[in-house]
Amino acid sequence: MIQAVRVHEVGPPEVMLIEAIELPPPRPGEVLVRNHAVGVNYIDVYFRTGHYAAPQTPFVLGNEAAGEIVELGKGVKRFKVGDRVAYLANLGCYAEARLVPAERLIALPKSISYETGAAMLLKGLTAQYLLRRTYKVRKGDRILVHAAAGGTGLILCQWASALGAYVIGTVGSPEKSKLAKKAGAKEIIFYRQEDFAARVKEITKGKLCDVVYDGVGKATFPTSLDCLRPLGMFVSFGSASGPVEAFDLRLLTQKGSLYATRPTLNTYTADPDDLQKMARDLIRVVKSGAVRIALTTHPLRDAVAVHRALEARQTTGSIVLIP
């Protein structure tokens, strides 16, 4: 039996319960991983509240973790018992252990801690595809990163800065401003108090941005479109303030023949080979020091309090639960 955080009915943070569950032996192609650290992401809130539908109830929250392999299913060749790994999975990670398809495992170098591995994978791979595939950021590009002091935002700022981009970040407080600046944002905008589109125009001397990375959603749309140069790209990858509702596509024409996309990590990592390539790129920038993963740790039993703080936007960087 293992301890896990389960949800029997969707709702506020208090619906999360610590319960004992039993895992079956690994099937062919699977491994059993003992989790040493579990990543917390805003998508966990979406599942807990029912914004995203879980395939069944009750269910265990969580989409990323890091730990060591303790048992192999038949046919697993690439890994052995004792290997350090990190992984993405569709639910089930807020637990002391879980079964994972071997093809979804990422080998974790000894130079990267379990805590960092759990904190960096979902957010870091999101930053990887946003910067290297959805819009290929190049030296001299002007980019706007909303929620720049959040877990993904801090990685985006650092990585984009390392690529030579001019990074403008939006934040909600002076404390978050300091973090975003340290991560490489050249200019900071307090999006709740300022007209951020007007500030972007002022900062760029009217040239505006090549791309906007928006994980906030409803509160920053459609104003984000006014931050883009003609033919610029609006990338909506999250909806912390609520989803962007359907809009008239003519808005994109009126504001300069803009592009808009709503990508997902699942699509970009569906092919196991793509997942491994992206992970190697992420591990490279983390090992080099170009990207540092800011994180805080909490016991797994504190999941309710962690979710309260996350929804209240009182957190910065990445959050890790320790089983």
Image (cartoon, rainbow, N blue to C red):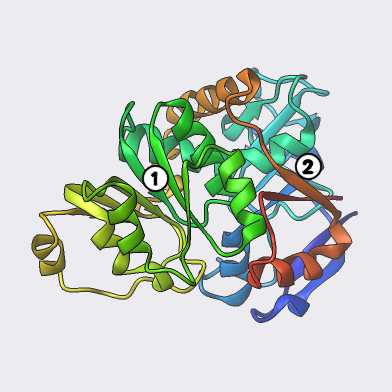
Which one is nearer the viewer's eye here, 281 or 99?
Answer: 281
Identity of the amino acid at label 1? Thr
Secondary element at image label 1: helix
Which one is nearer the viewer's eye here, 55 or 158?
Answer: 158
Which one is nearer the viewer's eye here, 178 or 104?
Answer: 178
Q: Can you see residue 259?
A: yes
When the figure is inspected, residue 291 is found, relative to residue 173, above or below; the finding is above
Q: Which residue is mark 1?
A: 267
When the figure is inspected, residue 184 is found, relative to residue 225, above or below; the finding is above
Residue 129 lies in quadrant:
top left
Query: Residue 316: horizontal and vertical position, in percent?
Result: 67, 54
Query: Residue 208: horizontal and vertical position, in percent?
Result: 25, 49
* Mark 2 vs mark 1, CA separation in Å: 29 Å
Query: Residue 262: horizontal and vertical position, in percent?
Result: 33, 56
Residue drawn at x 38%, y 49% is 144
Residue drawn at x 67%, y 37% is 293
Secondary element at image label 2: loop
Residue 167 marker? none
Identity of the amino acid at label 2? Pro
Residue 25 marker? 2
Quadrant holding the N terminus: bottom right
Residue drawn at x 83%, y 23% is 82
